[in-house]
Amino acid sequence: MTNMMKKFLNDESGATAIEYGLIAALVSVAAITALTSMGESLEGIFTSVDTTLKSATTTPPPAGT
């Protein structure tokens, strides 16, 4: 019984699992942050394209064409 208790106390496999869990959490937070900021940037680009296209379709062509 004492030998089994020593093995249990010296087992570090749970610590490794916790470390992998923390690394996965950090990667997830970094990915969410990057995608959120990239999403806002893409939204600005598409808004600019939308505005340009709308103004191009509502503006009459020059008289010489």
Image (cartoon, helix red, strand yellow):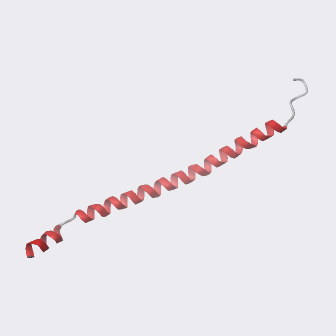
Tell me residue 6's x, y (percent).
12, 72
Quadrant in which residue 14 is drawn: bottom left
Q: Residue at x 67, y 44 (%)?
A: 46
**Up/down of 55 relative to 18, above or below:** above
Drawn side of residue 14 relative to residue 27, left or right: left
| Residue 59, percent from left and from top | 85, 36
Residue 15 appears left or right of 26: left
Give the image quarter of residue 61: top right
Q: Is residue 62 left or right of residue 19?
A: right
At which x and y percent is residue 43?
64, 48
Q: Quadrant of residue 7?
A: bottom left
Q: Is residue 51 above or below residue 2?
A: above
How far across and down, in percent of the image, does residue 63 sit?
91, 27
The residue furthest bottom is: 2
Look at 11% across and 72% down and name the residue there.
4
The residue lying at 61 percent from left, 48 percent from top is 41
**55 vs 1: above or below:** above
- Quadrant (top left/top right/bottom left/bottom right) for the N terminus: bottom left
Pick the quarter of the image with the C terminus: top right
Please identify the residue farthest to the right as the structure is shown.
63
Q: How many marks?
A: 0
Residue that lies at the very extreme toward the top in this rendered image: 65
